[in-house]
Amino acid sequence: MLQMCVWRCLRCVGVSLIPMAIISMTANILLLFPELKIHFLLEGHVTREALWAPGLWGGALVLLGARSFILSRSKRSCCADRCQMLTQLLLSCVVLLGSTSCCVLSGTAVSRGPLCLYTTSVGRVWDVPLQPRPNQPSGYLFNRTLWTSVCEEPENIVQFNLVLFSVMGLSSALQSLVCVFNVLNTLWGMLLCEDTHTHTHTHTEREGMSSESGQYILISLHHSSSDY
């Protein structure tokens, strides 16, 4: 019974990971197109962490793991079940690595701020003007006047990056928590593994012995009654 609960939890984990992976991938795709225009991407004027596409490859790993989790089934053999759960455990660790990397990179992007065009003493340049500096360690997150007064292009890029990277980071953080639970679930399943075929065979033998004992008792009673 506990073994079946492990397999059900594994499939539930797979189903829950799919929408979170899709959210991360969608957010990363949108981050590649500030103002929903392609020329920023073609000119290389996109935030570094968005170009690294952690939401895309991390989401792809999550979808791969989710598919395997959903299709997992008990093989009714302890050895086969343990081999399959070991595979699911390794896959869970890979998915956990991908989702954690996406979460860390999203947090880094939020902390640094976006790549944008702004005016300096030497003219207009593309750079990351809002990243924390020694004279401004808190960065831009707690100074909302910088959100609209520094970056000139793309329009509203600070809010655009902040929202999408936050969504991607929160989604990947939830994926990481689910994967940690899945690692514990598969470990628990490996410890609880029982050979259901052996138990079924033993139970059948016991039933057969009980049946033979019953027949022997009936024959003995029949002979006793005949003697009388």
Image (tube, rainbow, N blue to C red):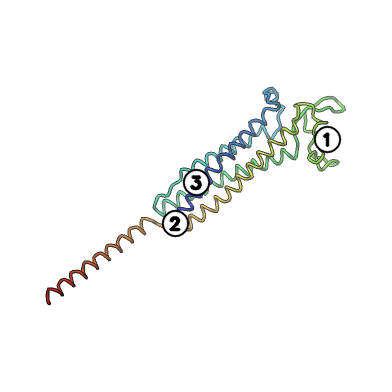
- Residue 22 screen position, x and y as percent: 58, 36
Q: Earlier in the sequence, mark 3 or mark 1?
A: 3
Mark 2 is surrounded, within 10 Å at the Cα level, by few (under 14), some (14 to 19) or many (20 or more) other residues, namely few
Give left or right: position of 175 versus 79: right
Identify the image quadrant of residue 202: bottom left
Residue at figure coordinates x 49%, y 46% from the top left: 11
Q: Amino acid at mark 2?
A: Met
Question: Residue 8 location in percent, x, y?
Answer: 48, 49
Q: Residues within 10 Å of mark 3 (few under 14, many from 20)?
A: many
Disc 3 designates what residue? 11
Q: Which mark is first along the chain, 2 or 1?
A: 2
Mark earlier in primary sequence (3, 2) = 2
- For label 3, the SS is helix
Query: Residue 149 location, x and y as percent?
Result: 83, 31
* Amino acid type, residue under disc 1 in the picture: Thr
Side of 31 where 75 appears, left or right: left
Q: Residue at x 35, y 58 (%)?
A: 200
Circle number at residue 154: none
Q: From the viewer's perspective, is residue 179 above or below residue 207? A: above
Judge whether 201 appears above or below 109 on screen.
Answer: below
46 left or right of 175? Answer: right
Quadrant of residue 138 in the image? top right
Residue located at (66% from left, 29% from top):
32
Badge 1: how crowded within 10 Å, few (<14), some, or many (20+)?
Answer: few
Whole-Å distance between the Cαs marked 1 and 2?
59 Å
Please give the residue where the numbered disc 2 appears in the rendered image.
1
Q: Are marks 3 and 2 in contact (CB under 8 Å)?
A: no
- Picture coordinates of residue 142, whole percent (x, y): 80, 41
**Mark on residue 145?**
1
Q: Secondary structure at mark 1?
A: helix
